[in-house]
Image: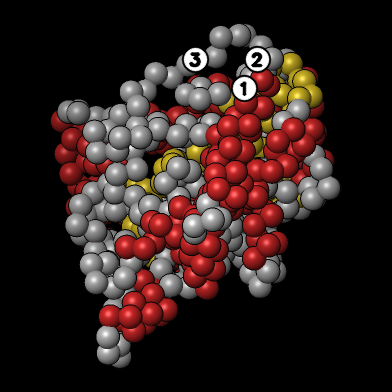
Amino acid sequence: MADILSYTIEELSQKLAKQEISSLELTKAYLDSIKKQDKNIHAFLSVDEALALADAKKADTLLKDAKNITKLTGIPYGVKDAILVEGMVCSAGSKMLKDYIAPYDATVIIKLKKAGAVILGKTNMDEFGMGASTENSAFGVTKNPHDVTRVPGGSSGGSSAAVSAHESVFALGEDTGGSIRLPASFCGVVGLKPTYGAVSRYGIIAFASSLDQVGPITKTVDDCKIVFQAISGQDPMDSTTVELKLKKPERKKLRIGVPKEFFTKGLDKDVEKVIKDTIGKLGNKGAIIKEVSLPNLQYGLAAYYIINMSEASANLARYDGIRYGHRGKKAKNLREMYEENRGEGFGEEVKRRIMLGTYALSAGYYDAYYLQAQKMRTLLLSDFEKVFKDVDVVAGPVSPVLPFKIGERIGDPMSMYLVDAYTVPANLTGLPALSVPAGKVGKLPVGMQFISGKFEEPTLFAAGKMLEKIYV
Ligand code: GLN
């Protein structure tokens, strides 16, 4: 038997159903793997061993009786620390919420509990999701399992590193501007940012509400599909969700559009080569490759950061240490209390965004910044809609750069923001996007990004599987 830790959900679900292995055995193997490796990787912020073992035993009873079994019954997974799991600390990577215990389960967690999956613990992230390297966590950086001197990407760096290092079979992430796809690309795993409205955000710590989506991080595209099916669907607790009607690919031959704006100055030559070679191989396998253009893409990053910071400044207003958040000890009056609680509780990047976002929303500036940025989204979406008349998916790099060294960009916020150039368009437009391993430069993974029309996740999975066959 191959190493139990190397199996995918698809393989494990068969072995569990046939009782060739038990969930308890599997969960123990993963807890051991965490114990062995996580001192070095730091993917997890907390692990609840007793709960995981109890859930695994419950799953084994279901499996024995062959009752209410799904492909996820008995499968251990990690949860980004922005997603509420009842009774567990949910810190969002912030000192502000380090003692906050979730009073209820997020809808995605309720769904996975019903499916019988086993929670291992909560994974590390950039504070409130703000970052591309996990270095903004208040609880220390996560390391890239492929090279521990480098970042795993962010903000769902803990979830991606956990899957990559076989510390969990799959994990949940959250993506506001690339936070699932970027770390998936850096860690050599699969990550999906679903269509806006496909997955409930009830019980997720809000970052920028018009951009946030929850999604899976997995070892394979098939696994990604399984988790996506389990967590998606309309939820009365989140009015932005819709009844899910996924569109299946209509054509036999996949038509791939390659936007020329994805291959410009800032793109690392080695990353470019991997992506171009892979697109060539997809062509050899029968895909139709066309060059396309997204003329408004150049404004994407600027629009994203205005919208992101504006919405974050509003969402984070609730952390004043009264109902939620860190409470300081010295303040003598209300004003001092706000200053102290928020001054001590938030990290530097969070404060930067609150200040810039508040400025962008202030009277007189709202029209010049937030409103303009919102208009940009419509233009960008119409660029994509035009392109999707001729092709089924758009393909390009996930990140313009390879996984960078820990410390390399953290002192320069602009250089960190630039890493998001290719991921933010999907959030601005609400389109679904998938990151799939496409190759390596030395030992460093490079991810390919596929973007499709709304609710066309099945097309993304088809494209992802085609790529997987080329590069395993
Ligand atoms: N790098 C992006 C940012 O800092 C990622 C945000 C996210 O997707 N949570 O805004």
SS type, badge 2:
loop
Residue 59 sits in quarter: top left
Q: Residue at x 69, y 54 (%)?
A: 418
> Which mark is drawn over residue 385?
1
Residue 352 sits in quarter: bottom right
Residue 100 sits in quarter: bottom left
Residue 299's place in the image compared with 355, above or below, is above
Residue 77's place in the image compared with 127, above or below, is above
Residue 46's place in the image compared with 449, above or below, is below
Q: CA distance from mark 1 to mark 2?
A: 7 Å
SS type, badge 3:
loop
Q: Amino acid at mark 2?
A: Lys
Q: Residue furthest top?
A: 251
Q: Nearer the viewer, residue 380 or 130?
A: 380
Q: Residue furthest front?
A: 364
Q: Residue at x 45, y 52 (%)?
A: 311
Q: Amino acid at mark 3?
A: Lys
Q: Quadrant of the N terminus?
A: top left
Q: Residue at x 19, y 57 (%)?
A: 103
Q: Which residue is mark 3?
A: 248
Classify residue 326 as left or right of residue 412.
left
Residue 329, x across and y down, in percent: 28, 88
Q: Quadrant of the C terminus?
A: top right
Q: Which residue is mark 2?
A: 389
